[in-house]
Amino acid sequence: MEKLRSIMLACVGFALFLGLWEIGGRILGSALLAPPSAVAVDYVDLLRQGDMLRELAGSLRQMAVGFLAACIVGMPLGVAMGRSDVADAIFRPWVSMFVVTSTAALIPLFILTIGTGFMLRVTIVFLASVWYIVLTAYNGARGVSPMQVAVARSFGAGTLQIFWKVTLPAIYPFLITGARIGLVHAIRAMVLAEMFVIIGYGGLIHRSGLLVDTGPVLGLLITLMIVSLFFNWLLGEAGRRLAPWYEQQRVTL
Amino acid sequence: MSELETRPAGTGAPDKLEIRNVTKYYHGRGNSLPVLENFSLAVKDLEFLVLLGPSGCGKSTLLRIIDGIETCDSGQVVLDGKNVTNTTGDGRGMVFQSFELFPWRKVIDNVAFGLEVTGVGKAERLDIAREYVNLVGLSAFEHSYPHELSGGMQQRVGIARALAIKPQVLLMDEPYGALDVQTRDLLQDELLSIWERQRKTVIFVTHSIEEALYLADRIVVMSPRPGRIEQIIDVPFGRPRRDALKSDPEFLALRREIWQILKKGARV
């Protein structure tokens, strides 16, 4: 019942927002703010033309390369920092510096060194997401219960066994969370980098923004939002499937 | 003090486990606090020994040193004539106060953990684990996760996990300390019935006099800072023991006497 209620409330809020947007759009006109009714028409056009989905697929493929690289580097690095004081001392200053640095500020620098092609997007996506993955894995590794490690030792487990059978399963939910946060940043960085060099999906948004009609831009943004939400949900669902104990444990706490 | 018979350790049945001159300091900033100093104790084969004392008397530390998850500064732990000081595994199975099950493992896999890390094959260890899950009455929950179980059930899993490795000595560190009184009473009876079917040397830590009297063959009453033996008490009650024993006049008299001993040793 509680859930139904909150869904109802969300729908009411959504309808109210659309209503206000429609009124605002009618007053301001499509050049400044296309109303939802106009965006819907433009959206069907965007789908029919095929540019939107084709560019999106291409961009997401490149984003995936950068994001996977960030996972492959970030997860072990975070775990190592969390479990070893030496690794922590060496890498933490760098992680702290980069995580607060605006990705947008780095893009012009990288355009000069690696150009505007495939590698630029991969690099920017990597740099935008890797630190969140590192920090989440780091916190997970820090939080491994010393008592559970002691239990494993008590039963005669060796260092490697403790790592595979206790540390990793204990960190696993943090790796999934880190990947979810990282992915959101990766998609944002993808669009950002593409807007700088006007290619891919970000380029499409940029070009549409130059038109005297805000309908297509809003349509592109909606697609982007849906895609981000979908991937975030997908990773969360994968985490729940693989670690059924985690969500339920949190709920009962 | 008339009913209490005290005797030096090491008489009667052969010794299963010997604690020889164990010393343990906790090192703080600038100072070292002795937890145990030259502590010696002999545990007989197949006896149910209870370490009883107030918090801070070093009883849990002693148990963790016997298990090997905590190291001692000097002294020896000898099991069946073999020096097992500061090593883990090897004949000792431990039950923890806060259960400490692995939340990502199902009941059966938690119970099989000790066998898994010692290299027992999958089919064999699952068979053994199933047997012990059954022994603690949780067959219906084999494939449940720990968070789906009550505290009492979780501790049953903890006991099955320790028993599954067929330890020479079962170590229990205030195993019922985190449970409510009713569950505690039920689990005491269950433990006794398991123990009567599968005799085993048990070292059980508690601060409850009643629990100590109800379970033990011998009670080692300890006092704190540094932990030392105040008195060793032979519990005169026969077995099997039933819940009614707890209101028996002799039981209550002994309970009062042990309380006097604890009070004498306590420095508040």
Image: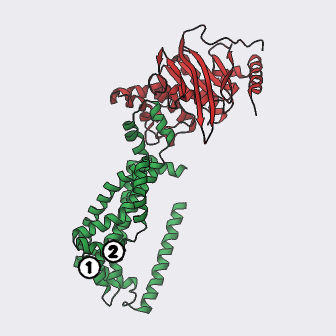
Chain colours: A green, B red
Q: Quadrant of residue B25?
A: top right
Residue B45 seen in the figure: no
Q: Mark on residue A198?
A: 1
Q: Residues within 10 Å of mark 2 (few under 14, many from 20)?
A: many
Is B27 above or below relative to A55?
A: above
Q: Secondary structure at mark 2?
A: helix
Image location (x, y in percent) of residue B48? 59, 18
Image quadrant occupied by the N terminus of chain B: top right
Could you say where residue B222 lies in the image, as x and y percent from the top left?
Answer: 67, 24
Q: Is residue B144 above or below residue A112?
A: above
Q: Which of the pair B231/B212 is nearer the observer?
A: B231
| Subunit under mark 1 | A
Residue at 51% of width from left, 37% of height from top?
B100
Mark 2, residue position: A192
> Label 1 is placed on what type of residue?
Ile
B181 displayed left or right of A186? right
Q: Secondary structure at mark 1?
A: loop
Give the quadrant of residue A101: bottom left
Mark linked to residue A50 = none
The answer to whether residue A201 is seen in the rendering is yes
Residue under the point 77% across and 27% down: B263
> Which of B27/B162 is in front?
B27
Same chain for labels 1 and 2? Say yes or no: yes
Q: Along the line of sight, which residue is nearer the eye, A87 or B256?
A: A87
Residue B184 drawn at (x, y percent): 63, 31
